[in-house]
Image (tube, rainbow, N blue to C red):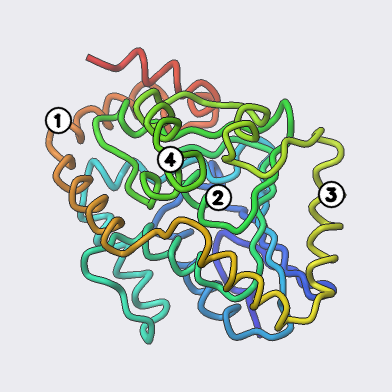
Amino acid sequence: MSYQELAGIHVSLSEGVATVTIDHPPLNLADATLLPSLRTFIARVRHDSDVRVIVFDSADPDFFIAHGDMGFIIDPQTAVEAAGAAIAAVPDSAVPPTMNLMQVVHEELRSLPQVTIGKLAGLARGGGNEFLMSLDMRFAAVGKSGQAQPETLMGIIPGGGGTQYLTQLTGRARALELILGGELIDAELAAAYGLVNRALPADELDDFVNTLARRIARLVPEIVAAVKTAVNVAAAVVTEEGLSIENEVLTSLFSPDAAAHAQKLLAAGAQTREGERRLEEILDATRG
């Protein structure tokens, strides 16, 4: 199976493990380039029997996936075009009409037969954090990682599955805290809340994840499939209905006011490398 021509990602294969490195400068935005590439990868790897574990990491030391492209808020037509590109990339896979592009990509990722692992050593906000939450497991580097759902501070809500995934992982009260508060949380708090499996010293993250991935890859595939099937039954279920409601209420918030707010954020430095390092400060300064 070939994965070499996919824009914004690099894929390497070794001992049953596919390492997908997100490399989409300048910020690894979830946009009209990255999302179709991810969807194409997911569609291909689903049928690749040589891949038993998938590890997602980033070539950027500061950002995993920064967040969704704010251009989707300013000009909804860009979101339509991005969705069209993602649909064209995998034309044989049906797209539920009540779900948006990010939700579709994340749900296709969640349904993969392989075990998926996120290795977080940078910032993941909004759609970037939603992508992480759609994986089977997540591990974060102490002192380097940060996660947030800041959409409410932008006049919208999480719309890539965030309201559903966060509630499933952390519980209702903590989901409300993180979504309504929009706080950037570190690896230790993320682990305490159940948002990641473990917070690890930054210099131990690679070895830990690589060892775990290869240990799982050595298991008989039928064992992994059986475990995932049984555990998924026990876990709280994310439904298409719940995602559709999330998408419906999100879409209602894509107003001229939200577009104007997004323009203010961009003018203040959002979606620049320096601005993204202090995004919470920019969000607070542009409110009201």
Mark sitting earlier along the chain (3/1): 3
For label 4, the residue is 126
Disc 2 to disc 3, C-alpha distance: 18 Å
Q: Which mark is residue 257?
A: 1
Residue 126, image quadrant: top left
Disc 4 to disc 2, C-alpha distance: 10 Å
Q: Percent x, y for residue 131?
A: 50, 52
Q: Residue at x 66, y 67 (%)?
A: 115
Q: Which mark is residue 208?
A: 3
Mark sitting earlier along the chain (1/2): 2
Q: Secondary structure at mark 1?
A: helix
Rate crowding at label 2 as few (under 14), some (14 to 19) or many (20 or more) other CA atoms within 10 Å: many
Answer above or below: position of 181 versus 204. above
Question: Which residue is nearer to you in this view: 269 or 104?
Answer: 104
Disc 1 to disc 2, C-alpha distance: 29 Å
Disc nearest the viewer among 3 and 1: 3
Query: Disc 4 vs disc 3: Cβ atoms closer than 8 Å?
Result: no
Disc 3 to disc 1, C-alpha distance: 45 Å
Q: Amino acid at mark 3?
A: Phe
Q: Residue at x 87, y 49 (%)?
A: 207
Viewed as shown, does residue 5 lie left or right of 219?
left
